[in-house]
Image (cartoon, rainbow, N blue to C red):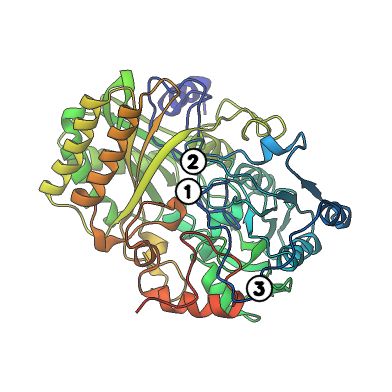
Amino acid sequence: MSDGARALRDEHYRQPMDAPTRREFLARGAAWGALGLGVAAGAVLSGCASTTPASGPTTAAPRRPASEVEWRRLARTLRGTLVRPGDLAYAQGRLLFDVAVAPSRPQGIAYCASNDDVARCLAFAREHDIAVTSRSGGHSYAGYSCNDGLVIDVTLLSRVKVDNSSSRVVVGAGTRLIDLYDALAQHRRLVPAGSCPSVGVAGLTLGGGVGVLTRRYGLTCDNLLETTTVLADSTTLTVNDSTHPELLWAQRGGGGGNFGVTTQLTYRTHDLPTLTLFSLHFPWAAARDVLMAWMSWIPHQSDDLWTNCLLESAGADGLGVSVSGVWCGFPSSLDGLVNSFIAETHATPTSRFVGGDDYLAAMAIEAGCSSLSIAACHLSGEGAGVLGRAAFHAKSSFVVAPWSAARVENALGSLEQLAGRSPDLGAALAFDALGGAVSRVGADATAFAHRSAIADIQATHSWSTYSSRAQVAAGDEWLGQLAAHVFESAAGAYVNYIDPTLDGWLDAYYGDHVAHLSRVKRWADPDDVFHFAQSIPLRAPL
């Protein structure tokens, strides 16, 4: 790619360094200040939230609380590090990815460096009746991975080992997505995954894993071959299609943090294809025609094409609509497809970009890190990372068939009303294409329950320290209106965009798989040790 073409490309995809990426947050407010923001419940879930129940159900008498001596003894047995209240690292350790979630005060945060570390922490928690949760990347939208007990953090488990001879990669559960992409690119291999650079790979995978190569290669969990998982009784299991296939089934889309602490994942990898990116921007007056054309057009396109349609209220930048995507092929073969889409809209884009790029550069663009080094493309406080955190709320849904004109008008009208009422908020509706390879996996082959959807939807609004409570309330009301009057309730919701306000969340996340997941839960965690506000229950509701 020429320097001129690259500059044009970057102009289309550029985002402020301290703002959320398009994939992570999908909206850019005018007054976010120093705040910045995929995915997903961690390895394991992520973040520290006071909404997590203190413990799971128990019939045994309360055990003796751990003394300071016993906490110090636990610390000495670990290869990793135990952080306690009063330690210098405690404040950073309990930070939430979403600063809007009220933090709790863990009794301890264990940065585990081995399976044995995890097993010892679980045994300690059982002995002293301490609530336990686990954490990978810290990106749970509800912050379900922190409580007032013991947090098992797998950040130190971040080794990536690529085996070209078997087309496999073995990945530590604490690996950040950008580091996985970097390691794979060096071997000219890929695993289809998301776009948020700082998300932990375990949580992203266990909930499904959608991204820009999903239509070509499937969900991240579709490429998951094996895990190492430590159960609540401290047993370490190798989980694959031969040993414990039911648990592997549940880990392919059943959500993180439900069955045990996942410490390692093995994936199938693929050869790197030639990639081309495109981006189109349209005037807001064309939003209805663009969204309706996109929904009707994308189900009929080749698996080699992934796209998304973004409707946003971006503060001082006003309302906007854009369509962007990634094509597994050369620019010359994408031009005709882009032209065919523009013709379907009966609208003229205000700008257009089509250009090729290499795999790692393309993933960095989608992550909002095209101007950063790999080391910098991490959260602030993680080594040389410079990415920020954010205050945001979100809801999700799926599209199972192209929407009617009335439903589209309701969606656009709700965003217009929010922009008029609270123009400083960053808010967006993002539609990401599914179908392709995702739809060719059997409905019961994995725990992911949304194989027939043609797109997933993420609605988000964000704010800064300068935003008033009334503005934040307006954003929350907008999300509620979408859920009540725009989203199709039967379409479900995405567990990696976990939503603590969602009614009927169990069916929405898992559909017909609830009873099956509960059976696996009873086998893997019969005492419901891994329990949080939206964890899979031991018994499916009647």
Q: How many marks?
A: 3
Residue found at the very far left of the displayed protein? 406
Residues 465 and 137: in front is 465
Q: Residue at x 44, y 53 (%)?
A: 498
Residues 147 and 65: in front is 65
Tell me residue 130's x, y (percent): 68, 61
Circle 3 is placed at which residue position?
61
Is residue 135 found left or right of 4 in the rendered image?
right
Q: CA distance from mark 1 to mark 3?
A: 30 Å
Q: Earlier in the sequence, mark 2 or mark 3?
A: 3
Circle 1 is placed at which residue position?
142
Is residue 340 found left or right of 525 in the rendered image?
left
Q: Mark 2 or mark 3: which is in front?
A: 3
Tell me residue 117's x, y (percent): 79, 59
Residues 153 and 58: in front is 58
Mark 2 secondary-structure assignment = loop
Tell me residue 328's x, y (percent): 45, 48
Q: CA distance from mark 2 to mark 3?
A: 32 Å
Quarter occupied by residue 165: bottom right
Quarter occupied by residue 393: top left
* Type of amino acid at the residue the image marks with label 2: Val
Contact (Cβ within 8 Å) of mark 1 with mark 2: yes
Circle 2 is placed at which residue position?
101
Q: CA distance from mark 1 to mark 2?
A: 7 Å
Can residue 380 be seen from the camera position used here?
yes
* Type of amino acid at the residue the image marks with label 3: Ala
Query: Does residue 469 lie above or below 519 as drawn?
Result: above
Q: Residue at x 65, y 62 (%)?
A: 262
Mark 1 secondary-structure assignment = loop
